[in-house]
Amino acid sequence: MRMKLKLKTVFVFYFMVSLLGLVYALMQLGQRCDCTEHDKMKDNTIYRLRGELHKLQEEVKKCDPTKPPKKPHLPTIYVITPTYARLVQKAELTRLSQTFLHVPQLHWVVVEDSDKPTALVRDFLSASGVAYTQLHTLTPKERKLQDGDPSWLKPRGAEQRNEGLRWLRETASATKGQQGAAMETSVVYFADDDNTYSLMLFEEMRSTQRVSVWPVGLVGGMRFERPVVDKGKVVRFHTGWRPNRPFPLDMAGFAVSLRLVLTNPDARFDGDAQMGFLESSFLQGLVTMEELEPKADMCTKVLVWHTRTEKPKMKREDALQKQGLGSDPKVEV
């Protein structure tokens, strides 16, 4: 009986203590608590632990046998882009630069159709984050398209591409030693500022030994044009217009070894070439069809598209200009 009484007393005591504790805890809810010092200590601890974790992760990276080895020296891709002043010029160059930013070891040679470098292109390139060279050369008046002329009437950008080739030859000639040897392993690509390029395209062309080729989408009034490959060799071209041309390729459909350009100092684009023969005027002195190097899974994948930006319609702007209410000319578009 005494044992039962003692146990009952213990249980009552335990119950009372627990109840008081619960009441106290409930009273603390809603009370202001100065936790600044506690939070500061907690933040310091977290910061310290993160630092130690970062150090450990770096150590693991150094010791990780599964980590892939560093890539060997990548050949530089020199991209020559003709450009000219127009409303969409900056927009086109911006889109192109956003692609080039993701391509390692790329040097952008931008050649303006102008008698002097423009501030717009200069300022744009300096802020682009892409390694670049700004050049300029003016297309002769008799070779320029006039208002209303179709885009295919005359070859475009021949003088600008030739200016880019001239700069490459002069730069290579002045570069000696290891840098000169590395430059000779480089690749030259002619990228118009209105096309769309997959990042995979640049890795495909980087191994070019002479002239590499691949399909181009949305060109020549077709879904795509491409070299047709049989047993690893280009045997003909899938194109809807003048397939008998020496090289019925779009400008975006090939890349050239810089070494090949340097060993053929007279190779250039003919600004007077007839319609559709501009690419052939450059390539036919460099390579034969049998020597072409098919890329993009034996020319079965489209990695570049011949897109064009629609010319903006400025009717409302023109109307406001006549009223003296046009857009602020100081704002660069």
Image (cartoon, rainbow, N blue to C red):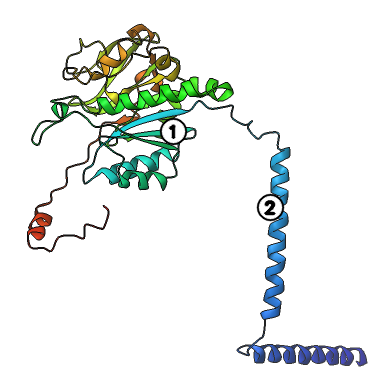
297 sits to left or right of 196:
right
Corner quadrant of residue 160: top left
Tell me the residue at 40%/16% (across/down).
Answer: 261
| Mark 1 Cα-neighbour bin, 10 Å: few <14, some 14–19, many ≥20 | some
Label 2 vs 1, first from the N-terminus? 2
Number of the front mark, 2 or 1 = 1
- Of helix, strand and loop, which one carries label 2? helix
Is residue 6 placed above or below 312 in the rendered structure?
A: below
Tell me the residue at 21%/30% (across/down).
Answer: 139
> Residue at label 2?
54
- Of helix, strand and loop, which one carries label 1? strand
Corner quadrant of residue 148: top left
Instruction: Please name whichever residue, 4 or 51, is drawn nearer the observer in this view of the structure.
Output: 51
Is residue 245 placed above or below 150 in the rendered structure?
A: above
Q: Name the amino acid, label 2.
A: His
49 sits to left or right of 242:
right
> Residue at label 1?
107
Q: Name the amino acid, label 1.
A: His
Residue 58 is situated, as x and y percent measured from the top left of the image, at 69, 46
Q: Quadrant of the N terminus?
A: bottom right
- Separation of residues labelled 2 and 1 (CA atoms): 34 Å
Instruction: Please name whichever residue, 73 or 142, is drawn nearer the observer in this view of the structure.
Output: 142
Residue 33 is situated, as x and y percent measured from the top left of the image, at 66, 86
Is residue 13 placed above or below 71 in the rendered structure?
A: below
Residue 51 is situated, as x and y percent measured from the top left of the image, at 70, 57
Disc sitting over residue 75 in the figure: none
Contact? badges 2 and 1 (CB < 8 Å):
no
Examine the rendering and report whether any part of residue 28 can be seen: yes
